[in-house]
Amino acid sequence: MSTLIAAENLGHAYHDEWLFKNLTLGIQPGQRVALVGINGAGKSTLLKLLAERFEPLEGKIVKNKSVRIGFLDQDPQFNEAFSISDFIFSTENRQQQLIREYEELLEDPDPDQDKLNKLYEDLSEHNAWEFEHQIKTILSRMGIQHLQQKVGTLSGGQRKRLALAKLLIDDPDFLVLDEPTNHLDIDTIEWLEKLLTSGNKTLLLVTHDRYFLDNVCNSIVELDQGKMYRYEGNYAYFLERKAERAASEASSLQKNQNLLKKELEWMRRQPQARGTKSQARIDAFYDLEEKTKQKSANQPITLNMKMARQGGKILELDHISKSFDERNIIDDFSYVFKKGDRIGLAGKNGTGKSTLLNLLTGSLDPDQGKVHIGETTVFGYYRQGGLIFNEKDRVIDVVKSTAEYIKMADGSTISASALLTLFLFPPKKQYGMVEKLSGGERKRLQLMRVLMQNPNFLILDEPTNDLDIDTLNVLEEFLENFPGILMLVSHDRYLLDKMSEQLFIMEGEGSVRIYNGNYSEYRLNLEAAKTTKEKPKPPVASAAVTTGSQKLSFKEQQALAEAERRIDEIEIDLAKLNTELEQTNGSDFQAIGDLSLKIDELKRELDVQTERWIELSEK
């Protein structure tokens, strides 16, 4: 099989330090490769080199000139003055331009029928209807609706989704993706998995999401201390082989350290004049010393921070409600937190997860109800937006601004420098500028500052974004042993499954549902409900939970009956419309367009009614 793209003897440096040298990598059509490695190893740099964003200092990238490369940056940059349409639809692609005109016309509450009819004809002539459906599906999945909106008004998460949408619409020969699941909700991630594994797509990606990695990739490349190791298999196979390599390297390290001691004695015994020594042996000594230092520095993080004492009263949500611009986010929600609670917060983007967290911590007041915080409750809040660092500050000064010395779980006290070392910031990094840190290293620094506060109520809002898998494994080990309360928001299904025993599910329109179990159990239950049209039966909620009456009110009974009636009606109407569409003359563009719009409207209403039916059936 011919190679689609290859890197030959690649080498690149950043801030006068070599990230890697002499790397060789080939990717063949249909291969879906995951690139893994610790933060700062050079993963994002390697992706940019392969995507031809800049030239390597050494070596070259070889590919066929006809190969189209699509690149998703970790932090996409845009022309702020562009509208979403300007960015999404390529001016060189006639199909895309027709679809753009069609979609923009549909946004008009009173569209010009003559223009609409002409577009029906043009779209059919250019065989663009299927492409229009694909584009509409992608934009909808990414939460992109208002095509005339300026890119400059979008949040960071919206920009990342917009860049990913553009890439999927263009469908290049080779996809290079840097953290594609960041800022996506779990439903969208699962849809993206199916899309990327359909057909014969070729891709190289960096991701911290282990379920995504396992479901999408069939090959793993590890970047470790400037060297590359390739594994043909899934993530579990990679872990097995990596463990074997680590054991072998540990044995070699011990031998090197013993040899280094002997060589050091030889160096000390020799006269100071270099000419009297064996230059080859001197060079070998320094080479051995450097190798030993590198291996010794690559030690795992150990997190054992002290936790503040927790009293009997922790936190109580008493019938809280919150709305923004007449949009109901949380409606009459109550819960009493108890010791040992490990809660995952789930829901689609925009349903109010961050709002609920801000209400918990008192940074936002409810419109109704009360939030009662216990006197001994100490929050540690890792925010999705991250910390704003002064780029010219030294890393160690960022930590010292919080505390010079930090208490550990065993009662000992360590310095800020020692704690940074535990978090894989060696002295050279500690006294370097923040501007030299990678995105993942900044996140690790932020997490460290949160844990320094010795919280007993830990809130993590998307902690996995930009962290390497090694750091995530250590974070998980810490969280498993964390005795306080854990509240976790994450699109990482593996982390949610492992760390949470209960879910708060933000269902939209103010509804917060409580489910006892992890995320995978909830999804299986939900899928079974969709298949059988039966409501998933979650385990009985804790006695500490107060969600109101378990019986439906008279109005709710009426709403349930109405939802059932309407679902039956819609399904009958959809069947009729689909039959009518099949029998329509293929040249009657007006009729085809009208029927398609009616079918889309009914499908949207069916989704709404089904969700309402499920919600009421639960009670």
Image (cartoon, rainbow, N blue to C red):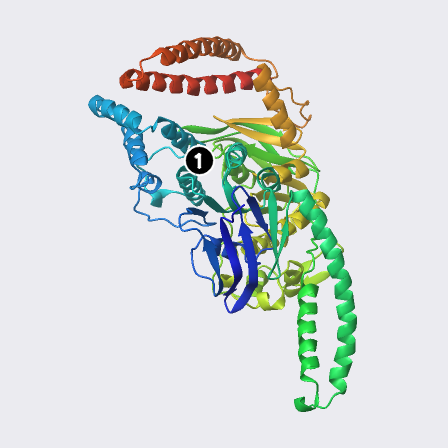
| Whole-percent x, y for residue 572 in the image | 45, 8
| Whole-percent x, y for residue 195 in the image | 50, 34
Split into 4 quadrants, where in the image is the N terminus? top right
Q: Residues within 10 Å of mark 1 (few under 14, many from 20)?
A: many
Q: Nearer the viewer, residue 72 or 183?
A: 72
Residue where numbered disc 1 is placed = 142
The residue under the point 28% across, 19% down is: 589
The residue under the point 34% across, 29% down is: 128
Q: Nearer the viewer, residue 236 or 408?
A: 236
Split into 4 quadrants, where in the image is the C terminus? top right
Tally the numbered discs.
1
State which quadrant residue 140 falls in. Answer: top left
Residue type at mark 1 is: Met
Q: Is residue 240 left or right of residue 76?
A: right
Q: Establish if 276 lies above or below 616.
A: below
| Whole-percent x, y for residue 405 in the image | 66, 62
Q: Is residue 376 left or right of residue 76?
A: right
The residue under the point 63% across, 25% down is: 524
Q: Is residue 367 left or right of residue 419?
A: left
Answer yes or no: is residue 460 visible.
yes
Q: Establish if 362 lies above or below 394.
A: above
Residue at disc 1, secondary structure: loop
Answer yes or no: is residue 180 visible.
no
| Whole-percent x, y for residue 89 in the image | 33, 39
State which quadrant residue 341 falls in. Answer: top right
Q: Nearer the viewer, residue 477 or 119?
A: 119
Given the current orientation, which residue lies at the most extreme front position?
1
Q: Establish if 307 lies above or below 398.
A: above
